[in-house]
Amino acid sequence: MILIVDDKIENITALKKVLESHNFVVDTALSGQEALKKILRQSYQLIILDVQMPDMDGFEVAESISGFSKTNDIPIIFLSAVNISKEFITKGYASGGHDYLVKPFDPDILVLKIRTFIKLYEQTLELSKMQQVLIDEIEQRKRAEQKKDEFLSIASHELKTPLTSVKGYIQLAEMSVQSNEKENALNFINRSSNQLKKLDTLITELLDISKMTTGNLEYHFADFNFEPFLDNVIDVILRSNPGRNIIRSGYADFFINGDEFRLEQVLLNYLSNAIKYSTEPHPILIHVETTDSNEVKVSVRDSGIGISKADQSNLFGKFYRAVQSSSKYQGFGMGLYICAEIIEKHGGTYGVESEPDKGSTFHFTLPLTNKNHNH
């Protein structure tokens, strides 16, 4: 769209007629102030400015346009019948004009110039977009490399910690056996076993990350009842954490179409995090309900350290660990990223509500199957 700015309606009418006859879309303004208001609201490909206008002349309008980042590249053509000296033409270019035509002018020449300036303007916009895309891509790659380096450092540390512990406990167990201290030996073997479980979890997570990156994480969908599934997951987590109290509420006797193994990963991750980040006397609350959208919603609530607003938006991202937990708790920062991937593959949603020092509630939803209507 082209904007014509002139305080004389007869000039606007004549010029508008010429441009519209060449299929240009035209807008008009009868003053500099009106033009600036329109420029801020509307997008234009080119502006034709009369130099001699009351209150605000064409040069002042051009300078204002050049001062706005949104509009500083829009080509401006000055038209003047009065100010035709070299001094005024120079001022026109200095104020941001791309051309200065003296009346009377050849309409064909004007149309040719307009087409050329619009083409250049569009090319400039396209180049700017490409430049921004390249800048963004370079920044994404830099961040990705940085996150990858951080992840490798974390992975190295996290895998080393249980391995070192296992090595130490086995040595202590050997010494206890040699000293005929059977009870101590069994205690150290149990501790080794717990560390090996942690190591197994970390390695499984690493393999899942690798498969996700290559798009090879396998899913086996089937209809299953959510009630026994939920009871089984809670039983698994309690066997690994016999001292903890998990309180369950809500109705779960309905069918889901999904991969039980993958969904078990999600729920175990939620429950494990709740246990990891909260103190022992407080129970973990798990609630299940159906929504108006024919979905099941599962929520896991803890009374732990909580999560800041800044961290919440990144929690389900790749390689991310909350600031307050990264130095104190084990993990790659990939568990919730894997959970997000699994829930998305099942057509569900996920999220978190939390406040620092007031605990967290992690939830996910899954669509129910049609089987429930016959159940």
Image (cartoon, rainbow, N blue to C red):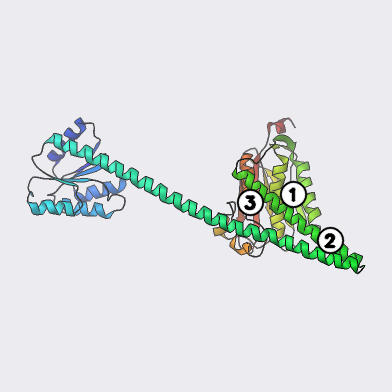
- The residues bearing labels 3 and 2 have C-alpha atoms spaced at a distance of 31 Å
The mark found on residue 249 in the picture is: 1
The mark found on residue 336 in the picture is: 3
Question: Vertically, is 181 above or below 83?
Answer: below
Question: Tag 1's secondary structure?
Answer: strand
In the orientation shown, which residue stands out farthest toward the bottom? 179
Looking at the image, which residue is at 73% across and 55% down?
A: 199
Closer to the camera in the image, 154 or 257: 154
Looking at the rendering, in which quadrant would you find the C terminus?
top right
Q: Could you tell which of marks 1 and 3 lies nearer the N-terminus? A: 1
Q: Could you tell which of marks 1 and 2 lies nearer the N-terminus? A: 2
| Residue for badge 2 | 189
Q: Amino acid at mark 2?
A: Ile
**Can residue 43 be seen in this snapshot?**
no
Question: Vertically, is 138 above or below 163?
Answer: above
Q: Is residue 98 left or right of residue 132?
A: left
| Residue 40, image x, y percentages | 30, 49
